[in-house]
Image (cartoon, grey):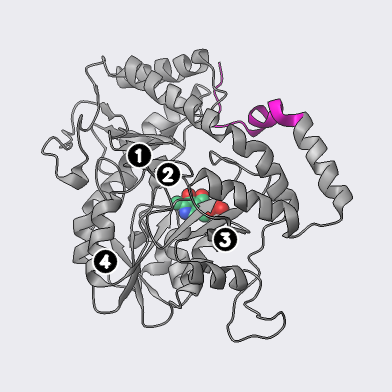
Amino acid sequence: MAVPLFTLARHNQPLREELHRTFEKVLDSGMYILGKEVAEFEAELAHANGLSPDQVIGVSSGTDALLLALMTMDIGPGDEVVCPSFSFFATAGCIARVGAKPVFADVCPVCFNLDPDSFAASLTPRTKAVIPVHLFGQCAEMDRINEIAKDHGIMVLEDAAQALSARYRGKPAGTMGDFGAFSFFPTKNLGGFGDGGALFAHDPALAHKARLMRVHGGHPKYYHSMIGGNFRLDALQAALLRVKLPHLADFSAARATHAKGYQDTLLPNDQVFLPSEGQCHCLKDPASPNPNPSPRKLWLPHAYQHNDSIWNQFTILVDGPGAATGEARDSLQKHLRENGVGAEIYYPVPLHQQECFASSEKPELPIADSLAARCLSLPIFPEMTPDERHEVIQTLLSWLHQK
Ligand SMILES: Cc1ncc(COP(=O)(O)O)c(C=O)c1O
């Protein structure tokens, strides 16, 4: 049986009629950019996250949400922004695009997110902000990150592109820093029908500024004391997202069921481990992983008690001979694909090793390097059937037990 990494057609099928009706409603409205649909989507998103409607700004993509936040903070040449090296490119790309310097910090080997100690060690008098990323649907260690940021007077922009509605100690992702950036890329837990994103802004004055910057920064229209861009969300995108938003909790719950299913079935195997039962390495749990390179073994992702992951990805680490160079992981990916199981590498090159950042001094970030060589994301989508999950598991085990 073939198991895709994700299937958008299957995911959106149950809402097909409502989506069709919504398309027609927007078509007939003649209002295609911003307007009522976007305002109502912003209000609904705000309500779901305990914010007021003026704190939520619908934008054209997750990348643009990051860029808009950095522009709203007036970050530019001469400034430094710290971000984790293990993330999607946009996190660092946006820092460079406003002319600032991305300063790469290492990550936690257990939750994969920004290591607060490495963040603290990366600060200089030029640091203006930090971008913790809530990778794969689980929040970074925000209490410590916020504490360090506050002590040094720098702003916090949460890259919550993969984590809408995840919670850290009960608080929604994207509401703990000064800004939160979200993506509605189709495979996200709340996936649109093209590109889309949202920016949460804590401070009402900054929220107001970001809203103006979304439309080139004119105030009043055509009078510019600042330079913004076109970061607008389409009415159609907002209207279709409004159809899906009430189902977000169910989508995430179905993903969580699959994550638990993977864990329950795989963990009794003596070559499969959870990195740490209790707290994250970010909080200095002594039981954090110390991978032994031989024999083949797998580490499963772990959601911590104080973190409600939304399981945007189920990312395992592959150890054994050839793990350090990526050979072991690549061999498992090949095996899965040859047997019809989708598996993807998020992300094969840590940001500090990207060619476009080669001119900056290269920090030593051993955990980011090691995760990039060992990570592999398995199928986890709401509509996946137990039989499909079983197929993924059996294919995984057949590789693990190969000699
Ligand atoms: C961590 C992270 N940041 C930013 C983005 C950018 O979002 P978008 O693709 O909507 O521009 C993504 C998208 O995959 C992401 O995963």
| Residue 97 visible | no
SS at mark 1 in the image: strand
Residue plotted at (43% across, 76% down):
75
Task: Note whether ligand 1 is within 8 Å of mark 1.
Answer: no
Residue 110 has which mark?
none
Residue 34 found in image quarter: bottom right
State left or right for residue 83 relative to residue 243.
left
Nearer-the-camera pick, 285 or 388? 285
Residue plotted at (50% across, 21% down):
339
- The tag earlier along the polypeptide, 1 or 2, is 2
Cβ atoms at labels 1 and 2 below 8 Å apart: yes
Reading the image, the residue beneath label 4 is 150
Extent of the magenta region: 1-16
Q: Determine the CA span between mark 3 and mark 2.
A: 34 Å
Query: Could you tell me residue 85's position as x and y percent?
Result: 33, 57
Nearer-the-camera pick, 297 or 216? 216
Q: Which mark is nearer the camera, 3 or 2?
A: 3
Q: Residues within 10 Å of mark 1 (few under 14, many from 20)?
A: many
Residue 54 has which mark?
3
Q: How many marks?
A: 4
150 over 21 or under it: above or below: below
Reading the image, the residue beneath label 2 is 346
